[in-house]
Image: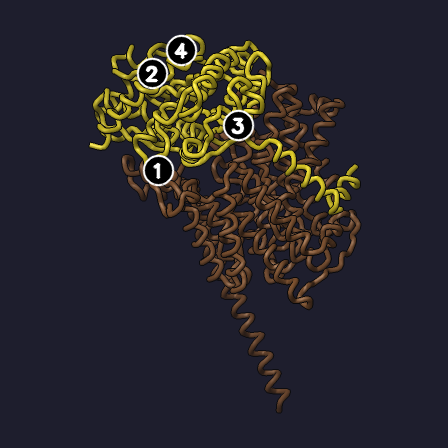
Chain colours: A yellow, B brown
Amino acid sequence: MLKSLTTTLLKNRPLKLSVTALSLSVAALAPQIAAAETFPDRPVSMVVSYSPGGATDFQARIVTMLAANEKYLGQPMVILNKPGAGGKIGWDAFASKAKNNGYELAAYNVPHFIAQSIVFKTKYNINNLEPVANWGADPAVLIVGKDSPFNTLQDLLDYAKDNPAKVTFSGAGLYVGHHIAFLQLAKASGLKLTYVPHKGGTPAMKSVMGGQVKAGFNNLSDAFRNQDRVKILAVADLQRNEKFLPNVPTFKEQGLDIDDSSVNFRGIMAPKGTSPEVLDYLAKRVPTMFEDAKTLKKMDSAGSPVRVIPRDEVISMWKEREAYLKDLLADLKK
Amino acid sequence: MLEFLQYLPEVFTPLNFLVLVLGTVGGLILGATPGLSPTMAVALLIPFTFQMEPATGLILLGAAYTATVAGGAVSAILLSIPGAPANIATTLDGNPLAKQGKATAALHYCFIASFIGGVIGVLVLIFFTPTLSDWALGFGPSHLFWVAILGVTVIGSLGSGSVIKGLFAGFVGLWVSTIGYDPVLGVERFNYSEHLGGGINIIAALVGLFAIPQVLSMLTGQQDAANVTKFAMESQSVLQSIKETLIRWKALVIGSVIGTIIGLIPGAGGQIAGLVSYDQTKKMSRNKEKFGKGEPAGVIAAESANNAMVGPSLVPLLTLSVPGSPTAAVLLGGLLIHGLFPGPALFTENGPIVWTFINSLLVGQLLMCIFGIAISRYSRFVMDIPEYYMAAGITVLAVFGTYSVQNSFSDVFVMMGLGITMFFAAKIGFSPSPVVLGIILGPIAETNFLQGQIIAEVGDGMVPYFFGGALNITLVAIVLLSIFYSVYSERKTKRKQLEALIQSHEQNTAGGQ
C-alpha cells in the first residue's frame, strides 16, 4: 500500500489531474446568489476567532455538529478558525469582508468583542453585526490556589486593604470577561488591585495553581474541573450556578455590586445587511439545534454551561453590555 | 505502577490498531509536508474523533502527534525545509548528509533516534507523572524568561560559520516577533499594514524562511547548468544504521534528557527542545567542527529531543490541564470533547481510556519507526524529481500550508516576503535557523518578562523576583555557562585555525627556500 501511495505521489500526471479536479470542485462551490426561499442550499461557514481546540472552538463545533440535519439547516456548518490578537483578527475580517447572504456566519464572544470595539480601532461593533442566537454562558469566578491563606472573599479583601496593589490577579488577557470582572471588583471594593494579563484562560489558571499570582478570574467551567487545585471564592453572575457550584455565593450575596457583565456569552452572528427572511429562518432554527438532546449531552460531558437565548433578547443584551462597558472603561481611562 | 500493562491489549483490538496505523502513516506524510505542523494535524483531526469511542479518538490524536513530529524530519533532511519548528535543528546536519548521498542513513538515524527518545519520553509520562506535575507547576514567569534566554544563547552557534551573523539574524528574528499586538498589554507595534495585524505567525515564518529560498535557488540554478548538482544515493542496511546510532549514545542521552525536561515545562514551547539539545551535543562533542557539515550526532540529538518531548508535554496536561506544548494545548480540546477532564481523578475515573491512550503512544513510537524506515527507502525518488517540478510542488505546498494555518492570505504574503528577503540574505552568508529561533523565543521571553515585571513591582522588586530562589539561580547559572563555553570554544577554534595557518605558512616558506 505504501509503495503504491508513494508512486501516486511521485508520478506527476495523476497529481496534476487531481489538482485540476480539486480546482474544478472548488469552482463548483463558488458563491452563487441564493434566493431566500431556497436558503440554505449549500454549506454555511462560521468563523471562529480563536484557535482550534480552545473552548470557543470546540463548543462551536459541538453546537453546529447537527446542522446538516433536515430539521435544522439541512446543510453542514463549516468552522473556519481565524485566530489572533484576542479575536480581533477574525472579527475584523468578518465585519469587513463577509457576504451578507446568510452563508457566512461567525461565532461571537461577549463581552470580548464589544469591549474591544470600545477600546481599539476595530472594524466591528454591535451596529454592523446581527446576532442569530446565543448558545452558552460561562461566568467568571474568583479563584485562589489550594494553599492560599484566603478562604473567603472577605479574607482576600481584608488583605488587599492592608496591602494596596499587592494582590495580583491573573486572567485571560485584556478586555475579556476576566478583565471586566477584575475591573468591576476593583471599582466595587474601592481597593487598589493588580491585574496580570495572560495569553488565554489556561495559562491564567496555571499561574493561580502554581502560586505565581495570589488570585485570578477564570471560567466557571475550568475552575469547576480544577477544584482539587483551586478554591472558588465567588461567582460574577446574578445567580449561583446551581448545577456545577451550588455552594459558591455570588459577589452580590457577599455585598459587592458586581453583575453579570463579565459573563462570557457565546453565540452565532451574521453581518449587517443579511436579509430579514434569512435572519428569521436562522433565528428560528438555530436555537432548536442548540437544544437538541444530542448537542446538550455532548456540551454537558465537555463541562460547558449552555444558555440558549433567542435573537431578540441577544439584541437587547448586546446594547445593555455596550452601554455599561462604555461607562466602566471610561472610568478606567480617568 | 505497572497498571499500564493491563491495558496494553486494548491497543491491539482491530479497530484501535487500524486507527493507530492510519494515524501514524498519515501523520508521517502530513508531518513531511512543509507548513502542516503537528499542532495543525491534531487540530484538523479533532472533528473526526467526535463519532469515535473516546479511547479510539485519543489513539488517533496521539498517533498523529507522535508521527508528525518525526515526519517533519523527512523534508528537513531531504529538502532542508523543516516540516515543523521542532525539526529546525535536524536540517543543520541532516541536509548536508543527504547532499553527501547519505539521505537513507540520515533518515534511519532520525527515526531510530526519534523512537528511542519517544519511548523514554512516554516512560517518563507513565512512571513519573504525579511527581513531575508539581515540579512543572513551579515554573513561573521569571523561570520561563530564563529558559527563553537560554534559547537565545544558542542562537549564535546556529549561524553557518560566523557567530556575528548568527547573532544578527537572531536579533532580526526577535524584532520580527514584536510585530503585531503586544502579548500582555495589547499595544500595536510596527503595524504598517493590515496584513501584519495578527503578528507574524510562526508557521508562516518557518515555511517562508526555509522553503522559499530553496525554491528560488532551484529556479535560478536552472539557468546555470553547471551548477546543478545531482547527488548519488547510497543505500544502507537498517542494522548498520542502528549500530551507528547507538555508538553515538551521548547524543541520544543529551537529546532525550533535554527533550524530556523542556517538554515538561509548560509554556517553554517544545519547539526549542531540538535546538537546545543540538547545541549542547555540539558543545560536548570532541569534533565540533564536523557539526553543520553532516555529523550524524547532530541529527540524532535533534530528533531524539523532539520526540522525547511528546510524552512529558502530556504530564502537566493530564494532571493539571496545563499543556506543555502548543500541540498538547490542542489535544486538551480533544480530551474535553470526550468528557475527559484532566486532573488526578482522570486516572482513577477514566483509567482504562487514559492508559490505553498512553500505551498507544508507546506502540505508536514503534510503528512510527518501522514505517519511517520503510519510507526512507523511497527517499531517493524525491531526490530524483527534476528541480523545476520540485520547485513548483514546494511552492504549492508552502502557499497551501501557510494559508491553512489561520485561513489567512496575510500569512501567505508574510511568508513570501520573509522568504524572498531570506533568499538574498542567504547569499551574503545568513542562515534561516537563528531568525526562526528569534521569532519563537521573542514572545516567550517578552510575555514572561512583562508578567514578571507586573508581579515583581507590586511584590519584592525586580532583582529578588528574577534572581531569587534555587530555580532562578540554577537557570541563570546554566545561561552563563552556555555563554562562557561558547566564547571559550570559539576562541579555542580560532587559535587552532591560527596555529594551522602559521604552520602551513611556515611550511610554505620552508618549502620555498
Point out which mark residue B259 bears: none
The amino acid type, in three-letter code, at marker 2 is Ser
According to the image, label 2 marks what residue?
Answer: A316
Question: Taking B510 as reference, is A12 left or right?
Answer: right
Point out which mark residue B186 bears: 1
Query: Disc 2 versus disc 1: distance between alpha carbons?
Result: 29 Å
- Mark 3 neighbour class, 10 Å CA radius: few under 14, some 14 to 19, many 20 or more: few
Q: Secondary structure at mark 2?
A: helix
Question: Taking B186 as reference, is A13 left or right?
Answer: right
> Disc 1 vs disc 3: which is toward the camera?
3
- Give me the chain letter of mark 4: A
Nearest the eye: A108 or B467: A108
> Disc 1 vs disc 4: which is toward the camera?
1
The C terminus of chain A lies in quadrant = top left
Please report contact status of discs 4 and 2: CB closer than 8 Å, yes or no: no
The residue at the point 38 percent across, 16 percent down is A314
Nearest the eye: B432 or A82: A82
